[in-house]
Amino acid sequence: MDIALHYAFLPHDDPDAALAFYRDALGFQVRNDVGYNGLRWITVGPADPSAPAIVLHPPAAEPGLTDDERRTIVEMMAKGSYAAITLATHDLDEVFARLEASGAEVVQEPTDQPYGVRDCAFRDPSGNLLRINELT
């Protein structure tokens, strides 16, 4: 079977802050930026166009959500407990330094984990958790 990850979705509550983080701080390219009814869906990813991408989406735009569900999503995002993704790099220290210098919220400095991974963690401007693993 030939199957690959193509997109992952993360919510955003401020498209300009999301762009500053994913494009400017992380160095991802903007592959698409679509607006509709005052909302924006922004697709970002590595320079390699065949690599998986992240779609930054407005969380409350899902059809069928109740007002209570929308409020719950907003509350969970504010607490940083709604969404997460793990990225990987060959130079964890360089990526950590770049993100820290950008003012991104540090959750964990580069650490050797007991389960065999060296990683760090940040929150993006919308509260999403990003763990970044070092590739060996």
Image (cartoon, rainbow, N blue to C red):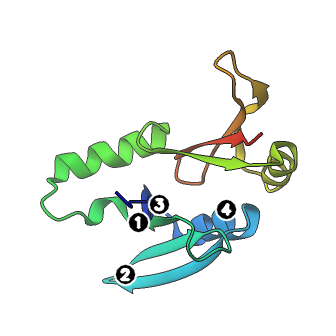
Residue 118 lies left or right of residue 77; in this view the side is right
Cβ atoms under marks 3 and 2 closer than 8 Å: no
Residue depth check, mark 4 versus mark 2: number of the one nearer the observer: 4
CA–CA distance between discs 1 and 4?
Answer: 14 Å
Find residue 38 and name its label. Answer: 2
Q: Earlier in the sequence, mark 1 or mark 4?
A: 4
Q: Which residue is mark 4?
A: 21
Quarter of the image where one finds residue 92:
top right
Q: Earlier in the sequence, mark 2 or mark 1?
A: 2
CA–CA distance between discs 2 and 1?
Answer: 12 Å
Find residue 29 and name its label. Answer: none
Q: Which residue is mark 3?
A: 12
Q: Where the C terminus falls, by quadrant?
A: top right
Query: What residue appears at the point 29 percent right and 60 percent down from the top-left corner?
Result: 60
Residue 117 appears in view: yes
Q: Earlier in the sequence, mark 1 or mark 3?
A: 3
* SS at mark 4 in the image: helix
